[in-house]
Amino acid sequence: METKLFSDIQPISFEGVDLKRPVVIAGPCSAETERQVLDTARGLAAAGVKIFRAGIWKPRTKPGGFEGIGMKGLLWLNKVKEETGMLVATEVATREHVIAALDAGIDILWIGARTSANPFAMQEIANALVAKPGATVLVKNPVNPDIELWIGALQRIYNAGIRRLGAIHRGFSTYGKHLYRNVPQWHIPMELHRRIPNLPLIADPSHMGGKRELIGPLSQQALDMGFDGLIIESHCNPDCALSDKDQQVTPESLNLILNTLVVRESTGTTESLAILRQKIDRLDNELLEVLSKRMAVCRDIGQYKKEHSMQVVQTGRYDDILNKRSSQAAEMGMDEEFMHTIMVAVHEESVRQQVEIVNN
């Protein structure tokens, strides 16, 4: 359904600007002063960055923090365009933001994770965009891992007539301490890509990692999975930044990161790769056959339990299977947590089938 709905989405492109893959959008988390904005922009322009980003309205988790410089930041972004020739981008969260940014000539709008999670806010922004069908809009994933909510946010913007539309993957919030500020959960943007293949995908390694040393590895992972571009926070003096200083890098550091990234072919299949994929297909078929046989045995067990009035779930047996299979997987060079997840799913399906037998 989504493929047909979003069939006429256009790639991220601007006349006279060479945006080769990966498209790189970079700049400070927040526009703080005119000098900070221009100094950062000059450094990024020298590094070959074509799109400059800066937040001028900043939604903060708690009141009292730096909430952005406001409208005068739009004037600074225009100075960046005039001096460097770069395109400029900023975050919008309300109807007023959209109108002000587009009237000021901002080239790209992005919608943040908190806003994309709110259908009322998304519809307000969509209504403001109806009169601007030529705008370019990027929608970040919601803070929670809900792909339907993400697609719904994109659809509201699409229904407003926007065809220059893209998605930004910034990871998902979780409770407790983790390596990442926002856990990537790459399978979710990959499912988004499967359902909307022509939708440009931009990765946000700054918000995913939350630490500048993770930007390079996360950027490479994104490119390896076929992402079209990167949006990275860069500041001329990140240690003194007024917001998110730990995840910002200098323009010089960003230049080094970009130069070390390996951009692999996103299309095309060699003969050797085709042979390997055929092997995968055969092995998948074998896996399905084995799972089918296992489920048949589970149904036989369900019939036995019904005839002998036994409860379906045998907790001791379940724990034994999980522990043994996870240990066996580790011995075979696989991840224990991966195998644990697989066996939980297999057991749940086995129980479901046995319950059906026992209750019929």
Image (tube, helix red, strand yellow):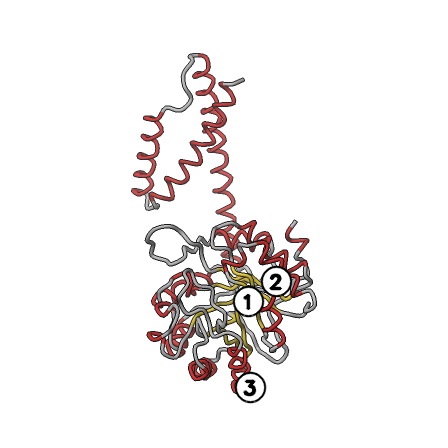
Q: Which residue is labeled 3 in the image?
A: 82
Residue 145 drawn at (x, y percent): 48, 50
Q: Secondary structure at mark 1?
A: strand
Inspect the image, locate mark 2, and give the three-letter code of the amino acid beneath it: Ile
Inspect the image, locate mark 1, and give the three-letter code of the amino acid beneath it: Val
Q: Is 288 rendered above or below residue 222?
A: above
Q: Which residue is labeled 1 in the image?
A: 92
Q: Secondary structure at mark 3?
A: helix
Question: Which of the pair 182/95 is nearer the observer?
Answer: 95
Marks 1 and 2 close (CB-CB < 8 Å): yes
Residue 40 drawn at (x, y percent): 43, 80
Q: CA distance from mark 1 to mark 3?
A: 22 Å
Q: CA distance from mark 1 to mark 2?
A: 8 Å
Q: Earlier in the sequence, mark 3 or mark 2?
A: 3
Question: Which of the pair 268/19 is nearer the observer?
Answer: 19
- Tell us which disc is closer to us: 3 or 2: 2
Question: Which of the pair 65/110 is nearer the observer?
Answer: 65
State the quadrant of the C terminus.
top right
**Left or right of 196, for residue 56:** left
Residue 125's disc number: 2
Q: Earlier in the sequence, mark 1 or mark 3?
A: 3
Inspect the image, locate mark 3, and give the three-letter code of the amino acid beneath it: Glu
Q: CA distance from mark 3 to mark 2?
A: 28 Å
